Amino acid sequence: MKVTSPEEMQSKFSKLESAINDFEKELKTNPKGRNNYFLLITGEYTREICDEIEKIYTDAGWTNVACLTSTERNMRSNCTRLQLFRNPKN
């Protein structure tokens, strides 16, 4: 008889991946070429996930990145905001 392990019951899709996929979908709905983007997704992610998101987008080339949960800024509940800024090319 096979017994299911806890590892088999965990999602292969992490919350970090889920958040980034949601932000990427939201980003694609915005016009290209802007110097800043303010993205809002459903779901309040932890500060640790927001820190990882900030690092990933900074490594991708954005000059200023801020990921904020709704409880951090008294925003609408159950949402996470991502602010992306880049320096305009001279």
Image (spheres, rainbow, N blue to C red):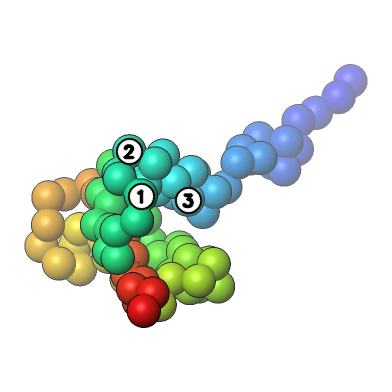
Where on the picture, by quarter, is residue 36?
bottom left
Mark 3–mark 1 contact, CB under 8 Å? no
Quick one: label 1, few (<14), some, or many (20+) residues within 10 Å? few
Q: Amino acid at mark 1?
A: Lys
- Quarter of the image that includes the C terminus: bottom left
- Label 1 or label 2, whichever lies nearer to me, is 1
Q: Residues within 10 Å of mark 2 (few under 14, many from 20)?
A: few
**Amino acid of disc 2:** Thr
What SS does tag 3 mark? helix
In the rendered image, residue 69, in percent from the top left (x then y), is placed at: 26, 61
Please indicate whether residue 71 sits to the left or right of residue 36 in the image.
left
Name the residue rendered at 48%, 66% in the picture.
Answer: 57
For the point 54% across and 48% down, which residue is it?
17
User: What residue appears at the point 80 percent right and 28 percent down from the top-left corner?
Assistant: 3
Mark 3 vs mark 1: which is more N-terminal? 3
Q: Determine whether the residue tagged by mark 2 lies in a helix, strand or loop.
A: loop
Percent of width and height locating residue 16? 51, 54
Circle 1 sits on which residue?
Answer: 32
Out of 3 and 85, give the one closest to the viewer: 85
Q: Nearer the viewer, residue 24 or 74?
A: 24
At mark 1, the secondary structure is: loop
Count of marks overlaid on the render: 3
Give the numbered dot on residue 2: none
Which of the two discs, 3 and 2, labels the residue nearer the N terminus? 3
Discs 3/2, front: 2
Q: Gap in Å between the C-alphas at discs 1 and 2?
A: 9 Å
Q: Which residue is mark 2?
A: 29
Q: Vertical placement of 22 versus 20: above or below? A: above
The N terminus lies in quadrant: top right
Q: CA distance from mark 3 to mark 1?
A: 18 Å
Residue denoted by label 3:
20
Q: Amino acid at mark 3?
A: Ile
